[in-house]
Image (cartoon, rainbow, N blue to C red):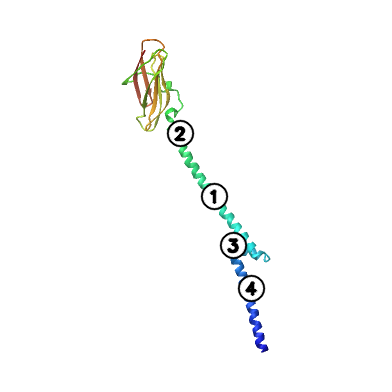
């Protein structure tokens, strides 16, 4: 009976010994489930500091994992911001190009580049405006660059045309795919008729209109 008792006690002790590592393993798994994915960092911490609590080690591992994830997210955000910035810059550049109808592409002296304003070989047509004395009347027309891309232009009246005539814009850049609107204004300062010529030209072409104003 004594031997059986001893054997019985031995089994109970073995069961207790077996329960210890199972309990530790259970606590470790619970900590991993509670604090995050196991990367082995917690085990390394416990090896360096055997007194460290399992849950605390796993918590520190989880914190490190969170920092890595945060760093990756910040990197992705920076990439996205950079892409958005490039997209925004490209859009702003396109919008700037679309405004070239009233902005010059190059900076040069028109008189030196084109010479004096002179009538071209062909007359595009006649612009007639009638107005009362000192009253402004207008005529609007649209023009595009017949060639590829952009072209700086000068719009002006020939010498001898009355200063009662004004055109806006007087300079800028013509676009190939978008109209540039020109407004011809006539404000007679004296009764009667006023005649002259309007010339719009670039380095590649010249267009001329006869202008006739009356009161």
User: Is the residue under label 4 in contact with that under label 1 (CB below 8 Å)?
Assistant: no
Secondary structure beneath dot 2 equals helix
Residue at image location 48% in from the left, 42% down from the top: 86
Q: Position of residue 113 (x, y in %)?
A: 42, 23
**Circle 4 sits on which residue?**
20
| Badge nearest the viewer, 2 or 3 | 3
Q: Along the horizontal axis of the image, is 182 left or right of 77? A: left
User: Is the residue under label 3 in contact with that under label 4 (CB below 8 Å)?
Assistant: no
Residue 34's mark? 3
Secondary structure beneath dot 3 equals helix
From this view, report whether residue 14 is shown above or below residue 66: below
| Badge nearest the viewer, 1 or 4 | 4
How packed mark 3 is, by other alpha carbons closer than 10 Å (few <14, some 14-19, many 20 or more), is: few
Q: Along the horizontal axis of the image, is 175 left or right of 44? A: left
Which quarter of the figure has residue 202? top left
Secondary structure beneath dot 4 equals helix
Counting residues from the N terminus, which is met first, the one under dot 4 or under dot 3? 4
| Badge nearest the viewer, 2 or 4 | 4
Which quarter of the figure has residue 17? bottom right
From this view, report whether residue 189 is shown above or below residue 6: above
Work out whether residue 213 or residue 196 is closer to the camera in this orientation and state it.
213
Q: Residue furthest bottom?
A: 1
User: Is the residue under label 1 in contact with that under label 2 (CB below 8 Å)?
Assistant: no
Residue at image location 36% in from the left, 26% down from the top: 142
Secondary structure beneath dot 1 equals helix
| Badge nearest the viewer, 3 or 1 | 3
| Badge nearest the viewer, 4 or 3 | 3
Kindly report the distance in space between the C-alpha atoms of the residues bearing marks 1 and 4. 44 Å
**Circle 2 sits on which residue?**
96
Kindly report the distance in space between the C-alpha atoms of the residues bearing marks 4 and 3. 21 Å
**Circle 1 sits on which residue?**
75
Q: Along the horizontal axis of the image, is 172 left or right of 52? A: left
């Amino acid at each position: 009976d004594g031997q059986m008792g001893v054997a019985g006690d031995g089994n109970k002790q073995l069961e207790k010994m077996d329960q210890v590592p199972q309990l530790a393993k259970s606590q470790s798994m619970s900590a991993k489930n509670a604090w995050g994915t196991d990367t082995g960092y917690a085990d390394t911490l416990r090896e360096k500091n055997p007194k460290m609590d399992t849950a605390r080690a796993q918590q520190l591992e989880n914190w490190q994992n969170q920092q890595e994830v945060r760093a990756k997210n910040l990197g992705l955000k920076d990439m996205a911001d950079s892409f958005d910035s490039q997209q925004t810059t490209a859009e702003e550049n396109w919008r700037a190009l679309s405004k070239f109808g009233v902005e010059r592409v190059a900076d040069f002296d028109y008189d030196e580049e084109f010479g004096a304003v002179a009538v071209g070989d062909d007359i595009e047509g006649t612009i007639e405006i009638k107005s009362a004395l000192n009253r402004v009347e207008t005529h609007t027309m649209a023009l595009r660059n017949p060639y590829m891309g952009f072209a700086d232009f000068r719009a002006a009246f020939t010498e001898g045309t009355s200063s009662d005539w004004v055109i806006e814009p007087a300079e800028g850049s013509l676009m190939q795919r978008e109209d540039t609107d020109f407004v011809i204004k006539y404000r007679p300062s004296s009764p009667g008729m006023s005649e002259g010529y309007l010339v719009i030209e670039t380095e590649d072409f010249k267009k001329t209109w006869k202008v006739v104003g009356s009161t």
